Structures are given as C-alpha cells and as structure tokens.
Amino acid sequence: MASSLLLHVHDLCFEEEPADGTEFYVSVDIVAHVLEGREVVAYTATAEEGEAGGGMLDLQQAFTFHAPKWSGLHRSLGSALRSADEEDADVFFIVYQEASEPGGKVREAGSAFLSLQHMLRTRADLPDETLDLIDGSGRLIGAMSVAVLGWKYLARVAAHPFDPACAQLTDAPALQVPLPADALVFAMGQLQLAPALLAVAAGSEPLDVFLALELPGEGGGGSG
C-alpha cells in the first residue's frame, strides 16, 4: 500500500534558450506545503559532444510528500482532494533561476501544475506527463516532463475525514463492542457504514478495503 506521493521532474525545455551556465532548481508546492529543491543544475548551451543544448535542461530531481495521519497537513490535503474546486488540489512545480551575480536575488522563472483530483478520479499514476511551463505574466516559456506516483496514497488521504482524536461523545452510554475485521462485509451500493464506525473497527483499515474494490465500469483498474 502506497504511503506517500512520489514526484519526479525529468527535464525542462525552454522556448528561448537560456544563457550558457544559467543555474536553475525546482521546488514543489502541495496545499501550501513546499518541498524545497536543493540541487542546482546549470544549463549548458553546448554539450561535451559538441551538440547544441537546444533549450533542454536535464534536471532529474525527485521529491517525496508524506503527511502523517491526523496531522494538519493530512487534513488540508484531504479537504483539497474532496473539494468541489479541483484547483484546490493542484500540485505546482516551480522553477527558480539563480542570480547571475554575487549578492543577486533568486527569481521565479516559471511554474507548471498538475491536478491530483484527476489522478484520484482516474485511479492511475502518471509516469510520464508533459506540462506547460508558464511565467508570472501567463506567458508560455517552455515545457516540463514529470512523473507523479501514488494515487492509492491520495485515495487513503481523501477518505479519512474522521479524526478520532477530535471526537467528543456527550450523554452517550459507555458501550464497547469489538468488531473483528473479518466480520465487516462490504457490498457496493447496498451497505454504507459511517467513517467513524469504520475507523474504530478492530484490526481493520477501511481504505484497504476500498482500494481492493473494483468500481463499476472498471475493466482492469488503473495502475498503482
């Protein structure tokens, strides 16, 4: 079972070729949580073999996103994935250009985005996606090749709206009924159990059951 979201930036292709030696790095933003890219890659106008760079920058930078269950970050991502506004769950890949002179400021060269809700709806990872790279004025300045893996992790986060640490029972009898995992029978469209009940079922992980189900209309299911 996936326990994190894996993101990989393969390369960039600029519409206008950067100056030789210009340095770039990438950061990733998911629900205002930033994964800082630390590896700076310099653009080479002419490769060692004498071939022109052609505006291509080979980055090969990897990021891992994990939000501990019941954390504020976990709740924020879950809310975004369940939001009626799909853009709430967009992941942004931000390209920064290092200052060309000592003491200069790093500037944002451009950014690209991808919908995590789309991954959730299609129940599929995205091993090779090409995204538009847009600058601050909305101008297309290039393209970015990325991979985003972990749709099952997103499904687990999206389906955990109940936080037992925040639950409060008032004027209720102290009744404890153990529910062994093998006693829970799920029938899609026939039985629906409250998230609170599923969350406290002894030895069970409700989302493991959800992810094992084949939704109506599915043939072989998405990749995972």
Image (cartoon, rainbow, N blue to C red):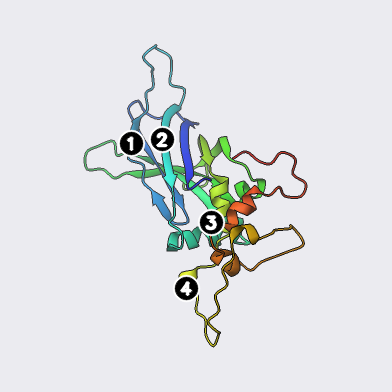
Q: Residue at x 59, y 59 (%)?
A: 181
Residue occupied by mark 1? 39
Distance from Cα at disc 4 to Cα at disc 2? 38 Å
Distance from Cα at disc 1 to Cα at disc 2? 8 Å
CB under 8 Å between discs 1 and 2: yes
Q: Name the amino acid, label 4.
A: Cys
Q: Residues within 10 Å of mark 4 (few under 14, many from 20)?
A: few
CB under 8 Å between discs 4 and 2: no
Q: Name the amino acid, label 2.
A: Gln
Distance from Cα at disc 3 to Cα at disc 1? 29 Å
* Secondary element type, mark 3: helix
Mark 4 or mark 2, earlier in chain: 2
Q: Residues within 10 Å of mark 3 (few under 14, many from 20)?
A: many
Mark 1 or mark 2, earlier in chain: 1
Q: Residue at x 76, y 50 (%)?
A: 216
Q: Is residue 22 left or right of residue 204?
A: left
Distance from Cα at disc 2 to Cα at disc 3? 25 Å
Mark 4 or mark 1, earlier in chain: 1
Mark 2 or mark 3, earlier in chain: 2
Mark 3 or mark 1, earlier in chain: 1
Residue occupied by mark 3? 157
Residue 12 percent coordinates (x, y): 47, 32
Residue occupied by mark 2? 61
Disc nearest the viewer among 2 and 3: 3
The residue nearer to you, when weighing 94 against 39, is: 39
Disc nearest the viewer among 4 and 1: 4
Distance from Cα at disc 4 to Cα at disc 1? 40 Å
Q: Which mark is residue 166?
A: 4
Q: Is residue 150 left or right of residue 187?
A: left
Q: Is residue 35 left or right of residue 172?
A: left
